[in-house]
Image (tube, rainbow, N blue to C red):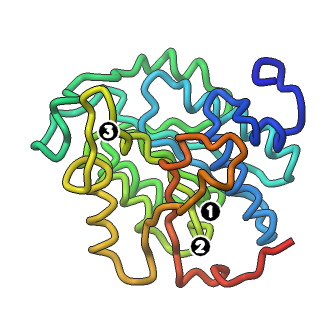
Amino acid sequence: MMRFGLGSFETRLALDAFRRPWYAYGMYEAADLARRLKLPAITAIEFGVAGGDGLVEMEAIARELEKALGVQIHVVGFDTGEGMPEEHDYRDLPYIWKRGLYKMDVDHVKSRLSRAELVLGNVARTVPSILERGLAGPIGFAVFDLDYYSSTVDAFRIFDGPVAAYLPRVLCYFDDIMSGTQMYHCEEVGELLAIREFNESRPKDQKIRPAHNLIGSLPMRPAWAERIWVHHRFEHPQYETYIGR
């Protein structure tokens, strides 16, 4: 089913029949919410492009969902292009990652893309620039795969824009909050620390929270469901809009 695209998008989604089913889930939910809110387009973002596999997959998913749901999906990828920067301190988990990992072959990645926008440079500078320029549709899904605590903190500036730049609930996938093979995450380091500090520093009307018991609602009970969190924009004018069937 994954290789030949057999079955409907929803059927393959239920059976985890995608190369990156967490991307498919996040983009589907975002596009479906936009459709229910009668919005014509959304933006899906990947922080940490590296070799481009994820961004290519997002392009393919976007094409399918546009046909299935009638919502335009603009894909944007952020990366330094130079690999991981120098780590700051223990919060960046330097026992797992180090400077120079995941260096991008920029020309090769660009040659693989057909529609996604690739934004190169330090996200501390590029994210504010993109927000100031404006997006083609409100952000509905964001992948955070920058590994470091410090880089994730910078990437969270993506939520500094005006309320119209977002869906009322933005699904977020955090690639680096799982443990195993000598990699152990906690709320004092890495992405989990960045999330905790974000929640502590933001007003009550804007929080990033886990999608509680999402794994129990999915047929295949996939482990990746634990990495799906949701950015709630409680003051969003459409946060209370009824979206039931």
| Quadrant in the rendering for residue 7 | top right
Q: Amino acid at mark 2?
A: Ala
Q: CA distance from mark 1 to mark 3?
A: 25 Å
- The residue carrying mark 3 is 147
For the residues bearing labels 1 and 2, Cβ distance under 8 angstroms: yes
Q: Which residue is mark 2?
A: 164
Q: Mark 1 to mark 2: distance in Å?
A: 7 Å
Other-residue count near label 3 (Cα within 10 Å), few / some / many at <14 / 14–19 / ≥20: many
SS for tag 1? loop
Whole-percent x and y of residue 74? 66, 47
Q: Are marks 1 and 3 in contact (CB under 8 Å)?
A: no
Residue 97 pos. (x, y %): 23, 29
- The secondary element bearing badge 2 is classed as helix
| Amino acid marked by disc 3 | Asp
Task: Give coordinates of residue 231: x percent, y percent.
Answer: 50, 65
Precedes in sequence: disc 1 or disc 3? 1
Please tell me how many numbered marks the rendered image carries. 3
Please name the amino acid that badge 1 sits on.
Answer: Pro
